[in-house]
């Protein structure tokens, strides 16, 4: 497993809280499965927060299924990406997912409000979207960081595929 770090300009030098999330990279016929927020025009690799007592692989399976309706068998963790912003540390663990079935989409209220839906995009197109992360720096720091995370992960993982 590879480990990378991203430190934001606003990092204060120490963290008080850590959030751990698990994300699934699912590729089918050169297309990447993404979660897309129709109301915000925002893309992301499906995944989310690790619940107390939950196994990381199980978290990845659950999050991908809830957001996309795709049931996967995850690989062992292939990448850990640590991000530091303000007084927080965000740890994203990425897994390669093999499709094994379908599941019911179960969105959170926030995900429903932003119109989240699964979308398949050509891998190169997804990388190009996330490569534009710096464009968001002047007005949307959260998206800039999100897109930088996804871009870094995809650039690192495509070298393994």
Image (cartoon, grey):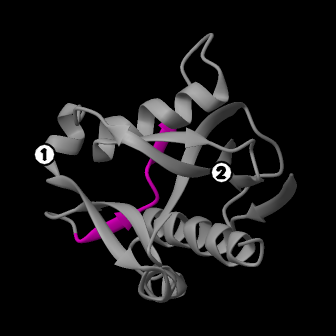
Task: Judge whether 80 appears above or below 139 on screen.
Answer: above
SS majority, magenta = strand
- Residue 152 position by quadrant: bottom right
Q: CA distance from mark 1 to mark 2?
A: 27 Å
Considering the numbered disc 1 on the image, is that residue within a helix, a strand or a loop? helix
- In the visual, does 33 lie left or right of 147? left
Quarter-of-image position of residue 65: top left
The residue at 49%/88% (across/down) is 124
Where does label 1 land, which residue? 113
Q: Position of residue 63 (x, y in %)?
A: 43, 36
Which is more toward the observer, 123 or 21? Answer: 123
Which disc, if any, is residue 57? none
Q: Which residues are magenta?
A: 41-48
Q: Are marks 1 and 2 in contact (CB under 8 Å)?
A: no
Residue shown at the point (60%, 16%) measured from the top left:
54
Give the camera-side residue of 14 and 118: 118
Picture disc at residue 86: 2
Give the structural element (helix, strand or loop) at label 2. Answer: loop
Answer with left or right where residue 106 lies relative to residue 83: left
Pointer 1 local density, CA inside 10 Å: few below 14, some 14–19, many at least 20: few
């Amino acid at each position: 497993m590879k480990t990378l770090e991203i430190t934001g300009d606003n990092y204060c030098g120490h963290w008080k809280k850590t959030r751990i999330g698990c994300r699934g990279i699912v590729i089918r016929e050169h297309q990447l499965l993404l979660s897309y927020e129709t109301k915000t025009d925002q893309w992301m690799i499906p995944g989310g927060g690790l619940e107390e007592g939950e196994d990381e692989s199980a978290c990845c399976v659950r999050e991908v299924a809830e957001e996309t309706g795709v049931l996967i068998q995850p690989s062992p963790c292939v990448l850990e990406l640590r991000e530091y912003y303000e007084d927080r540390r965000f740890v994203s663990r990425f897994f390669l997912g093999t499709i094994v079935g379908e599941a019911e989409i179960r969105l959170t209220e926030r995900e429903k409000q932003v119109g989240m839906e699964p979308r398949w995009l050509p891998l190169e197109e997804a990388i190009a979207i996330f490569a534009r992360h710096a464009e968001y720096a002047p007005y949307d720091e959260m998206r800039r960081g999100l897109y930088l995370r996804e871009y870094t992960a995809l650039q690192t993982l495509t070298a393994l595929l």
